[in-house]
Amino acid sequence: MARKTPGNGFVSDHNPALAGSWSHVCGNTSDVAHATSIPDPRPQTSPGDAPPAIELVGVHKRFGAVHALRGIDLTIRSGEIAAFLGPNGAGKTTTIDVILGLSDPTEGTAKVYGMKPAEAISRGLVSAVMQTGGLLKDFTL
């Protein structure tokens, strides 16, 4: 259950550790008695050494005879805003799936903050709201 704090947004009653994370979004949470700080999960580097937020190098993705991605090289630095534009079948969704770790590249490497997408996701560095829901063929139950 979440509750509103005076002027500071919402905090979780079920997980007090989340209250500290609101200080990044909402400012001072000193009025919340159980607020704690959550450590920054990003790799610790100096500003000049920070790895790109997203880095794709020579990424190919094949689905049988279909070659959906052909050698994509892409670097997006932290704080940059990028848009994927193109016609149907251009590989936009497949590229996003590789970045999110939902699909592995057939060739090449994909990194998020200098690590494999799955590691970045497990550290809470990546989130996405997809346009449609469903399971991918790569996953089995």
Image: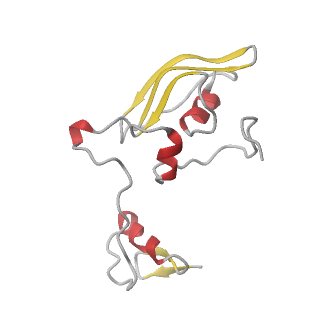
Q: In which quarter of the image is residue 7?
A: bottom left
Front one among 51 and 85: 51
Q: In which quarter of the image is residue 61?
A: top right
Instruction: Name which residue lies at 38% across and 66% down.
Output: 38
111 in relation to 69, above or below: below
Q: Picture coordinates of residue 82 (x, y %)? A: 46, 33
Q: In which quarter of the image is the N terminus?
A: bottom right
Side (left or right) of 8 relative to 108 = left
135 in relation to 72, above or below: below
Front one among 24 and 67: 67
Instruction: Name which residue lies at 54% across and 29% down.
Output: 84
Side (left or right) of 140 relative to 109 = right
Instruction: Name which residue lies at 53% across and 43% down.
Output: 118
Q: Picture coordinates of residue 15 (x, y %)? A: 51, 76
Q: Quadrant of residue 48?
A: top left
Instruction: Name which residue lies at 33% across and 69% down.
Output: 27
Q: Picture coordinates of residue 73 (x, y %)? A: 46, 20
Side (left or right) of 89 relative to 36 = right
